[in-house]
Image (cartoon, rainbow, N blue to C red):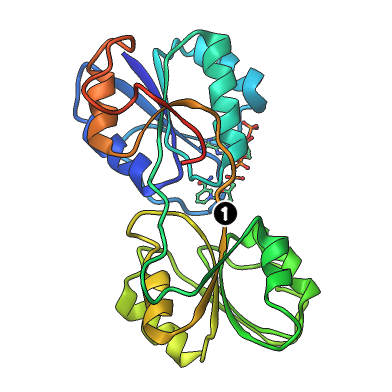
Amino acid sequence: MRILILGGTTEARLLAERLAPRRDLEVTLALAGRTSNPVPHPVPVRIGGFGGAVGLAEYLKAERVDRLIDATHPYAAQMSENAARAAALAGIPLLALRRPAWTPVAGDRWTEVADAGAAAHALGAIPRRVFLALGRKELAPFVAAPQHYYLVRSVDAVEPPLAVSRATYIRARGPFREKEDRALLAAHAIDTVVSKNSGGDAAYGKIAAARALGAAVIMLRRPPLPAVPAVEHIDDAVAWLDHPPDHPPGHGPTSPVRGV
Ligand code: NAP
């Protein structure tokens, strides 16, 4: 059986690791190509877009892919939409593997906003010391709020730097633990963290650190995602592959999930 995993997440890589030794499966993983030096994967990797839903459907047919797994980041809404349309066009089963979102707990000071522009606005007029835990391509709206100090952490360099007078750039790749993020936020006297609700453990350090330090969190809400069969755990995705798509195992891919 030929499988295409749409990747770019820890879960996609871990799923590929689980499937790579299996001789009954031929697995390829697709990356958008957002980072110049991606983490190695144990299966063949295809880098770059497909040319929208139609391009992906053509690829699925040309490569005789039997099943598609959308394990992209929960904010990669365009790709998830393309996956849903392409699977329908190509007539193959699709499963989404999506991490559950984080939810606030006692001590959290979250403000939820729609997107990066709304986050920049929500920082307000009074200068704050802000940790921007967003992708490089989501930073532009903060130029409109140059009164704040920004600490920016990204995998690749932010080029050109933001047109603001006070910013510090750190290059690092997760996972990030609470202890190191607490030290980082304290060292830069951060009072506000801007974050996506990525879910999972690898990026949760800054959220726990903000809670411990009493810092505010401006959380970008997850975008709506297509209603397709979805699971939250790698085991359930493996089980889905081992069953005919019309007879899904146990809990999991039976109920359509939107915006998880
Ligand atoms: P997107 O806006 O949903 O996708 C834009 C286009 O990128 C897609 O239409 C597709 O191009 C291509 N693409 C996306 N994922 C792909 C994949 N796995 N394989 C091949 N092509 C892919 O997604 P995004 O631009 O990657 O990111 C949107 C949000 O997700 C951002 O907030 C970003 O920080 C976050 N995020 C993404 C990744 C990642 O690895 N992609 C990882 C972590 C976080 P075509 O239409 O040409 O096929």
In percent of width and height, residue 219 lies at 55, 63
**Left or right: 159 with respect to 86?**
right
The image quarter containing residue 136 is bottom right
Q: Judge whether residue 230 can be spotted in this image.
A: yes
- Identify which amino acid the numbered label 1 is placed on: Arg
Residue at screen point 54% across, 23% down: 84
Q: Is residue 231 above or below residue 176?
A: above
Residue at screen point 34% across, 25% down: 253
In percent of width and height, residue 232 lies at 33, 39
Residue at screen point 43% across, 73% down: 108
**Residue corresponding to mark 1:** 221
Q: Nearer the viewer, residue 149 or 21?
A: 149
Q: Judge whether residue 62 can be spotted in this image.
A: no
Q: Nearer the viewer, residue 143 or 254?
A: 254
In percent of width and height, residue 164 lies at 75, 80
The image quarter containing residue 172 is bottom left
Looking at the rendered image, the quarter that the N terminus falls into is top left
Among all residues in the image, which is located at the extreme right?
144
Q: Nearer the viewer, residue 171 or 226?
A: 226
